[in-house]
Structure formats: structure tokens, C-alpha cells
Amino acid sequence: MEEVELRFVNSTLFCQFSKEFPDITIFRWCSSIVDYVEFYGKDSDVREASERLKQITENINSTVVATGNLDNHLSTGISCRCTTHNSTIRLAESMNLLWEAPAVYSRGEERLRLISFASGDLDEFFREASLEGEVEILRKRKIEPDSLRDVYSISLRDLFSDLSIKQVQYLREAISKGFFSTPRRMRVEEMARSHGLSKSTMQEHLNKARNKLIQAIEPYLSLYIHSDPLFDSEREAEP
């Protein structure tokens, strides 16, 4: 089995949509019945993209089944109109390939991860997809069948649903600015000051976020320990 990450530039709907809105990043989950799509970017760009999506939906005889709009984030579900001719996801499925959600679109490019059970299936997909546009292999690796649980078992809701919005935002900022790096690139005082908070309040937000995340990870650690053969040898070596 192989896992491959691919980059596409083609005329499919969301590729072209991301080219039209280059400052928006699109994440897509598709069930063959509903396309669930999230758009991230500036408020003005997201609003414009929302209106444009309504036009496109009408043009392809689809319907919006759900929608939500937050500050920099539009989420929408539309009736799927995918075929093997207008969707790399459907094309991959038709060739016995598993795809790892979400597909990501940015600046006219699509990125998609696929799992193949036979090398010939991946070769055939590459040839067919190349007829529709540019295809580039970004990463490729051998995987074991048991590792499929690593791809499909983790739920973002399980990991983050107990965190408040502020905790998620502060934790993400702390990670990106090097608060947890070694050596530490940012002090909690600096982060607190930028948000008009006391050091103790910011530290409390980060501590709670970290502790909740550690608790949420525990079931996945247990699964990893019981599924990885390396831990079998460790257990056998214990007196």
C-alpha cells in the first residue's frame, strides 16, 4: 500500500473557485451526496465568495443544504454534482483509491492525499488526471494496512470540542509564535500584553487549553500503543 500527496491545477469547480479568490483557503469534505466546504480568509473576501458560490450552485443545478458564516469563516453544504470528469475525488474513487479528507484548495491549486492498494491503480489515476491539467507528486510513502486507522480514526471534534474559542485561538497563536518552542521565542507576558490581559489570565487560558488537549489525546495514545508492534516488544520485555 502507498500513500501519496498530489498537487493539481485543473478546471474543476473548486480549483477554479480558489483561483478566482486567491486569498481564500478552501477545505472540502465530500460524501458523494453532499459537499461540505469551509472557506477561510478576510471577512470581505469570504462574503464575496459566499455570493459567488450561490451563483455557481445555481449554474450547476445544485442546492445549498446548510450554511454558516462566522468572522473569517464560511461553511456550507451543497448537493454534490461530482462526476469522474469534474472531480479528482470521484476519479480517484472510481479507480479503487481511498482519499483522505479534507481536500485543500488555494490559489488555483488542489491538494489531495490518496491511498492505493495496488500501484497500478495509482499509475492509472495519474495518467487520467494528467489529461485534465497539471499533476505533481509532492510526497509518497509505503504504509502498512493497519496504519489506515491512523488516517481515519482521529476526530477534530473529539480533540477540540471541550476548548473554548478563546482557548483555541490563544493556543494556536502561542504555538505559531514559539511559546512552546525550545528555546522559547515568546513569553506569556508579551502575548498577554498584545491582548490586553494580565499574565496570570493568559497563562490560565493556555494551561486549560493544554490540559484539555492532553486529556482528549489519551484515547488515541491508547489506540496507538495497542496497534503499534513496537509496543508489543516493550510489553514482552517487561518483567
Image (cartoon, helix red, strand yellow):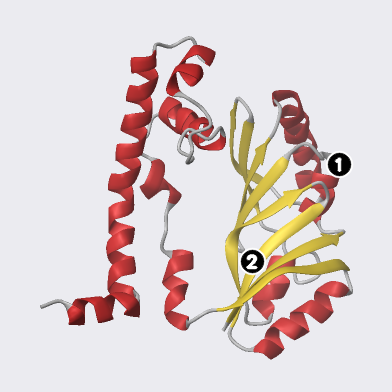
Nearest to the observer: residue 42 or residue 4: 4
Q: Position of residue 184 (x, y in %)?
A: 48, 34
Residue 5 lies in quadrant: bottom right
- Sequence-first tag of 2 and 1: 1
| Marks 2 and 1, how far apart at CA | 23 Å
Can residue 87 be seen here? The reply is no
Question: In the rendering, at what x and y percent does residue 78 appear?
Answer: 65, 48
Residue at the disc numbered 2: 113
In contact (CB < 8 Å): disc 2 and disc 1: no
Q: Residue at x 62, y 64 (%)?
A: 32
Quadrant in the picture for the N terminus: bottom right
Amino acid type of the residue tagged 2 in the rendering: Arg
Disc 1 target residue: 20
Can residue 184 be seen? yes
Q: Position of residue 196 (x, y in %)?
A: 48, 9
Q: How busy is the neighbourhood of tag 1: few (under 14 within 10 Å), some, or many (20 plus)?
A: some
Seen from the viewer's position, the closer of residues 213 and 51 is 213
> Quadrant of residue 11 in the image?
bottom right
Image-quadrant location for residue 12: bottom right
Identified at 56% across, 36% down, the residue is: 176
236 is higher (above) or lower (below) than 180: below
Q: Assign a secondary structure to mark 2.
A: strand
226 or 89, nearer to the observer: 226
